[in-house]
């Protein structure tokens, strides 16, 4: 049975805002979603172009001259010579012209200031391929240090292109992992970046990111109600009980699994993947999403008289058009494919590598204050790091890698100016971010009822007053930064 998981949950998770963590494994990580617009229709082919810039493979080895081509989009629709440079920074996804078209807030910022607007692609993602394949050996050039250096050279390249850009100020915007990037760009290259808006930036690398499932739990209780949270909790409890007594046939049928669960290796994977589908719901939540999932399960229980496990399974299956592949072995086979463009391996092999080598952020079941079972501790993720990358990682090296990242970039102890951090209180990622103003020029807004990167769209009548105020605040800050 091959690789059917990708795409299976497209409808279920109300795609396509996807980003981060293992959360979007099902359809790969995708760029942040802009609500209420049809971006395809708003792309103006006269003003948006796909372009390429040559970059060094290794910015930190002066003896290595190898080069590769990095992709970016450029939109000069509102540009007037000497206007500022706006850069929307791509993270672990494939970039598209729609995100710098009408409908996005950065587009409106560029319009207001007659700026030129860019969207850069992160090395190893999308069409930006620095090496011939993604072998473990080749992935050593995939890290945030190199990616930030790519951005620094990108800025110099654009500024040296024409005297009309040489003195232009640079504003960067990012969401999720690319929000981390824009915050750190301002930190590391203040002479190149005037100010950054970081939407949902995780900043502290963590081995056991158990808080993720805790925030998921709280978000479901808050938005979907206690009964809904109980349904998830009892479903996971019952599933663990069935595994304990060896009754996995019931699970096979309930979830329409492609093959029987192998008790020796599939169990952590099975539970993690199921919890991850719920993670997609919570992280990508927009008003109504969690509520609809809860109503669906409630209806299954009340109208069809299903128990909690079957109600949960029905919700999971709602998003799948075929059987559900929960084989750990198949997962490893899928993510050890090193060819570019292999459908199953568009971003996740690269992203999981970055977790093993830089950030971890393993979304474990370690906490007692969460409702998604107990079977996927740090060991599960550690094994994945070993199995996908030729045993290059072990607990010691991963801990060292995390310490290195936090040492290089400062984790939560940053001194920074001109960065605007925005977070959602429902976003399971927010515990790894800075949640209080650093100082006047680096303020923080936490929107209590918003999820992950929910503020990148244009100001719209659908916005809550708090969301609208946040978007107006970035407009104000950008005006200040450009006039300082
Ligand atoms: C992957 O690319 C490297 C060169 O970067 C090459 O030596 C190696 O043979 C490739 N591996 C496969 C399986 O194609
Ligand atoms: C982890 O890997 C490093 C580097 O390969 C090695 O030196 C170390 O002994 C390993 N540690 C454990 C606990 O296996
Ligand atoms: C903000 O903090 C930075 C670094 O700590 C400091 O240089 C700057 O003066 C502060 N700015 C304000 C407005 O407090």
Image: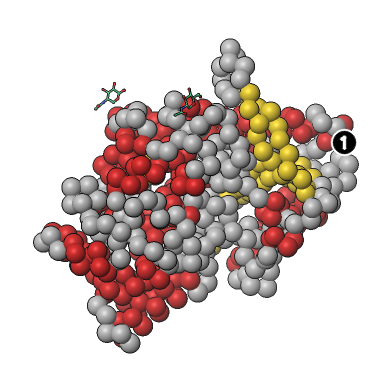
354 horizontally vs 383: left or right:
right
Q: Is residue 225 visible?
A: no
Quarter for ligand 2?
Answer: top left
Q: Compared to 85, does 38 lie above or below? A: below
Q: Is residue 117 visible?
A: yes
Q: Nearer the viewer, residue 173 or 122?
A: 122
Coloured how? Answer: secondary structure
Question: Which quadrant: the C terminus?
Answer: top right
58 horizontally vs 266: left or right:
right
Neighbor class of circle 1 (other Cα within 10 Å; few <14, some 14-19, many 20+) is some
Residue 86 point in image, percent of width and height: 73, 45
At x 71%, y 35%, the residue is: 52
Residue 96 point in image, percent of width and height: 66, 50
At x 69%, y 55%, the residue is: 98
Q: Which residue is mark 1?
A: 164
In this view, the residue farthest toward the bottom is: 303
At x 31%, y 69%, the residue is: 313
Q: Compared to 453, does 394 lie above or below? A: above
| Quarter assignment of residue 132 | top right
Q: Nearer the viewer, residue 86 or 298?
A: 298
Q: Secondary structure at mark 1?
A: helix
Residue 30 point in image, percent of width and height: 55, 52
45 horizontally vs 192: left or right:
right
Label 1 within 8 A of ligand 3 by Cβ: no
Q: Compared to 469, does 392 lie above or below? A: above
Q: Nearer the viewer, residue 57 or 442?
A: 57
At x 37%, y 57%, the residue is: 276
In this view, the residue farthest toward the top is: 63
In this view, the residue farthest toward the front is: 1
């Amino acid at each position: 049975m091959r690789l059917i998981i990708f795409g299976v949950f497209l409808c279920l998770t109300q795609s396509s805002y996807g980003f981060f963590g293992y959360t979007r494994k099902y359809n790969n990580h995708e760029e942040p979603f802009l609500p209420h617009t049809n971006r395809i229709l708003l792309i103006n082919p006269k003003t948006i172009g796909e372009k390429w810039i040559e970059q060094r493979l290794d910015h930190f080895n002066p003896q290595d001259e190898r080069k590769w081509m990095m992709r970016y989009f450029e939109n000069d629709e509102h540009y007037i010579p000497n206007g500022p440079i706006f850069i929307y920074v791509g993270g672990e996804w494939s970039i598209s012209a729609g995100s710098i078209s009408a409908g996005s807030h950065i587009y409106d910022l560029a319009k207001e200031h007659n700026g030129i607007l860019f969207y850069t692609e992160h090395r190893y993602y999308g069409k930006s391929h620095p090496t011939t394949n993604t072998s473990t050996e080749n992935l050593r050039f995939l890290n945030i240090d190199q990616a930030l250096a790519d951005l620094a050279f990108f800025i110099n390249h654009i500024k040296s292109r024409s005297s009309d850009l040489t003195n232009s100020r640079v504003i960067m915007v990012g969401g999720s992992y690319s929000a981390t990037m824009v915050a750190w760009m301002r930190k590391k290259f203040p002479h190149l970046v005037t100010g950054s808006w970081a939407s949902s930036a995780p900043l502290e690398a963590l081995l056991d990111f158990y808080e993720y499932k805790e925030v998921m739990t709280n978000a479901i209780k808050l938005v979907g109600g206690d009964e809904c949270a109980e349904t998830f909790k009892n479903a996971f409890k019952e599933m663990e009980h069935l595994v304990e007594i060896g009754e996995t046939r019931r699970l096979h049928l309930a979830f329409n699994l492609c093959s029987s669960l192998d008790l020796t290796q599939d169990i952590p994977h099975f539970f993690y993947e199921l919890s991850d589908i719920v993670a997609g719901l919570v992280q990508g939540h927009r008003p109504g999403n969690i509520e609809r999932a809860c109503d669906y399960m409630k209806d299954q229980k009340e109208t069809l008289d299903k128990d909690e496990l079957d109600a949960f399974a029905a919700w999971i299956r709602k998003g799948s058009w075929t059987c559900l592949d929960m084989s750990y072995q198949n997962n490893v086979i899928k993510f050890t494919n090193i060819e570019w463009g292999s459908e199953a391996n568009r971003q996740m092999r690269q992203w999981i590598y970055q977790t093993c080598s830089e950030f971890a952020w393993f979304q474990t079941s370690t906490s007692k204050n969460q409702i998604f079972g107990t079977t996927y501790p740090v060991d599960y993720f550690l094994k994945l790091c070993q199995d996908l990358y030729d045993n290059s990682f072990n607990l010691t090296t991963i801990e060292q890698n995390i310490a290195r990242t936090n040492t290089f970039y400062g984790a939560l102890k940053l001194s920074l100016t001109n960065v605007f951090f925005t977070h959602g209180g429902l976003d399971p990622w927010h515990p790894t971010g800075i949640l209080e103003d650093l100082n006047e020029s680096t303020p923080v807004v936490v929107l209590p009822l918003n999820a992950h990167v929910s503020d990148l769209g244009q100001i719209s009548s659908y916005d809550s007053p708090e969301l609208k105020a946040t978007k107006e605040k970035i407009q104000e800050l950008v005006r200040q930064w450009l006039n300082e």
